[in-house]
Structure formats: structure tokens, C-alpha cells
Amino acid sequence: MATAATSLASPPVESAIRAKLTAAFRPSSLEITNDSWQHRHHAAMRDQEGGSGETHFSVKVVSEAFAGKTTMQRHRMIYAALSEELQAGLHALSLNTKTEDEHINSREQQP
């Protein structure tokens, strides 16, 4: 499985996202980007560690678990897997969910 590069000790929310999505979807590719710094002026960020919390993430998941599912269904699957994190302060997810075939086709269409 390909994963985005992370530091030796990933922050706790990012680690939980990675662990839960890996267990739930067995992805062939999983990329997680912490975008929280871009939202440090938002109230949710100011409430967590003076604006350096983990509240906003971009997540790209390639998994066969998404086969036959609409985008909305896929996103609901992700939200369900991360329900504890969302209740504990995870504020926003930007999701990109594909099956392996969709991922391959999207790469082939790129110039």
C-alpha cells in the first residue's frame, strides 16, 4: 500500500485516521494531508492548541470497498469510520475516493 510520507511520530488525529481507514477499507493507496495550518484563523483551530491542532485534512483513498458505491455513499463510509474523531474535534475532510480501476483510468487521462 502506498502512503504519504509522514514524520517518525505522526500526530494523534492523523495516526487515528490512517489506522481506521486502513482497517476499514484495506486501501491500495492512502494519502493524508494535514491542511489545518491553512485554517488557523478559524474558531475551531484557535480552540485547539492555539491554532496548531489537527482539524482539517485532505484524504485520498483508493479501495475496492468503494466498488458499486456512489460518491455520497463512499463519503458516508469514511465519515462513519471516523465518527469518533469527528465528535472529538476533527472539523473538515476533503475526500477523494476511488476504486483501483477509477484510479488507473484517471492517471491514464492525465497528459
Image (cartoon, rainbow, N blue to C red):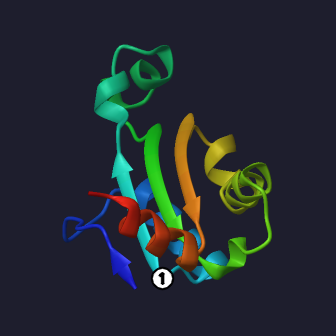
**Residue at 71% in and 52% down:** 71
Answer with left or right where residue 98 lies relative to residue 37.
right
Quadrant the N terminus occupies = bottom left
Asked if 37 appears above or below 86 in the picture, the reply is above
Q: How many marks?
A: 1
Q: Residue at x 63, y 77 (%)?
A: 25
- Tell me the crowding category of disc 1: few under 14, some 14 to 19, or many 20 or more residues within 10 angstroms, Cα based: some
Quadrant holding the C terminus = bottom left
Give 7 or 47, whichever is nearer the viewer. Answer: 7
User: Residue 17 at what x, y percent from top left?
Assistant: 51, 61
Q: Quadrant of residue 110?
A: bottom left
> On screen, 67 above or below 94?
below
Image-quadrant location for residue 73: bottom right
Measured as percent of width and height from the top left, residue 16 is found at 51, 64
The amino acid pointed to by label 1 is Ser
Q: Position of residue 19 (x, y in %)?
A: 51, 73
**Residue under the point 37% across and 23% down:** 39
Q: Secondary structure at mark 1?
A: loop
Q: Residue at x 66, y 77 (%)?
A: 24
Tell me if 11 is positioned left or right of 23 in this view. left
As drawn, is 85 to the left or to the right of 7? right
Where residue 30 sits in the image (x, y, percent)?
Answer: 44, 70
Most foreground residue, 106 or 25 = 106
| Residue position marked by numbered label 1 in the rendering | 28
